């Protein structure tokens, strides 16, 4: 399909297609039964993920949601509370599995930008008593999806980890797009991973692989996580055909992230010039762009429908709130095409050629 004829899909970075290198690796992958621990490609992926994150071990799981929920189940006991940001992924988008599977409660904390601080957390820490189970886990999301891909400062994460450790409470990081955070801060991934006992990251978002996430942590934590994965139905057999693409993604895709961030900033700066659209470009730190169309007088349905007619796809996340996500399958010309479609949807006159 000609690039001009294919959709410009900005709904999510999950829409990327496997690269030719990934497809070759998948077709040639050496496989075995991973439930028996005998898939060499899965084992290689897990070892590489542990190395990159600076953790002792890693576990390949079908999704980031499963990785997060495994971590919560291993770190906590039923009846305990999980401290998290009020718009975190585990609060909004994981089907209440904290309650369904781990028997835990969430203790959500409101923020202005999705980023917790120890100052906000400490007043929400509770020890066990005759009335409640106490705090079992602190969860942070980096980057923060709902807040528009915002990145935690490293010193903020270090302060949370130090104080949580003093209180005897583990920290889990939902790092679905943590490679974007590392790129934005220009630091190694392991520097961020060091600020949490466990970390999940997605292969199928910013890294462009077709399936899967990694959960990383200590050897004992991952050994228990493997058992919990089985309880959640996540035991896979010849999963090396998928893990092979993940290995390619780990090695090749991080280099693409700076250009993906630059495309997001281009979108943000261009959107700021369109009458009726509200956006603060300075808040776009990675690859997620949120903007408000209330000032255009258009409904989300009408706005997105107009874009769809021109082959541009975006996502509605609340009244007047639109999300676009850049990724490695896009080029700057695709972003320019999206901006032109938005201008027409908003009634901006075309410049004479």
Image (tube, rainbow, N blue to C red):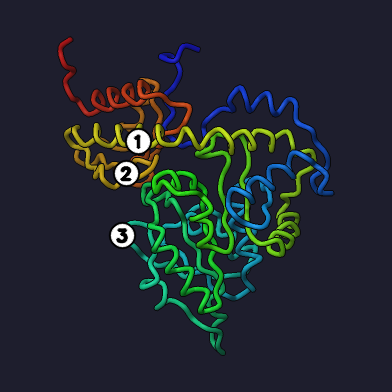
Report the disc number at residue 211.
none
Do residues under tags 2 and 1 come within 8 Å of each other at their CB atoms? yes
Cα–Cα gap, marks 2 and 1: 7 Å
Tell me what residue is drawn at x 22 percent, y 38 percent.
Answer: 277
Picture quadrant where residue 243 is located? top right
Query: For mark 1, what is the residue?
Result: 264
At 54% from the left edge and 70% from the top edge, which residue is drawn?
137
In the displayed orientation, state which residue is furthest to the bottom.
130
User: Is 104 situated above or below 66?
Assistant: below
Report if the CB atoms under discs 3 and 1 are less than 8 Å apart: no
Give x and y (percent) for residue 170. Answer: 56, 70
Mark nearer the N terminus (2 vs 1): 1
Please say if 256 is above or below 236. above
Q: Which of marks 3 and 2 is in front?
A: 2
Does dot 2 land on a helix, a strand or a loop?
loop
Image coordinates for residue 244, horizontal then vertical, percent? 69, 34
Q: Mark 2 points at which residue?
A: 284
* Front position in the image: 219 or 67: 219
Q: What element carries label 1?
A: helix
Residue 112: assigned label: 3
How many neighbours does mark 3 have within 10 angstroms: few (below 14), some (14-19), or many (20 or more)?
few
Image quarter of residue 324: top left
Local secondary structure at mark 3: loop
Label whose residue precedes the other's in the sequence (3 or 1): 3
Where in the figure is residue 274, as x and y percent of width and height? 19, 32
| Contact (Cβ within 8 Å) of mark 3 with mark 2 | no
């Amino acid at each position: 399909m000609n690039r001009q004829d294919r959709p410009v899909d900005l709904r999510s970075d999950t829409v990327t297609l496997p690269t030719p290198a990934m497809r070759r690796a998948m077709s040639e992958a050496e496989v075995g039964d991973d439930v028996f621990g005998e898939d060499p490609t899965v084992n290689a992926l897990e070892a590489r993920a542990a190395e990159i994150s600076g953790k002792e071990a890693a576990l390949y799981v079908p999704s980031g949601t499963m990785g997060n929920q495994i971590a919560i189940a291993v770190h906590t006991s039923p009846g305990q509370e999980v401290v998290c940001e009020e718009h975190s992924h585990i609060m909004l988008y994981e089907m209440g599995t904290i309650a369904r599977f781990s028997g835990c409660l969430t203790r959500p904390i409101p923020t202005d930008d999705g980023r917790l601080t120890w100052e906000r957390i400490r007043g929400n820490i509770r020890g066990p008593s005759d009335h409640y189970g106490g705090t079992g886990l602190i969860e942070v999301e980096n980057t923060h999806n709902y807040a528009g891909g915002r990145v935690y400062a490293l010193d903020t994460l270090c302060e949370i980890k130090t104080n949580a450790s003093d209180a005897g409470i583990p920290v889990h990081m939902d790092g679905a797009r943590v490679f974007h955070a590392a790129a934005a801060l220009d630091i190694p991934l392991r520097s961020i991973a060091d600020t949490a006992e466990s970390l999940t990251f997605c292969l199928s978002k910013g890294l462009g692989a077709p399936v899967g996430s990694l959960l990383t942590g200590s050897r004992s934590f991952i050994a228990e996580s493997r058992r919990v994965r089985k309880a959640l139905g996540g035991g896979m057999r010849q999963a090396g055909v998928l893990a092979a693409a993940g290995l390619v993604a780990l090695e090749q895709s991080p280099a693409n992230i700076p250009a993906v961030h630059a495309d997001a900033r281009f979108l943000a700066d261009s959107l700021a010039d369109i009458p009726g659209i509200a956006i603060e470009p300075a808040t776009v730190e990675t690859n997620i762009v949120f903007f408000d169309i209330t000032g255009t007088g258009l409904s989300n349905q009408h706005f997105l429908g107009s874009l769809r007619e021109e082959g541009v796809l975006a996502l509605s996340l609340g009244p007047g709130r639109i999300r676009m996500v850049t990724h490695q399958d896009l080029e700057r010309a695709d972003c320019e095409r999206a901006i032109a479609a938005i201008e027409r949807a908003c009634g901006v006159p075309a410049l004479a050629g």
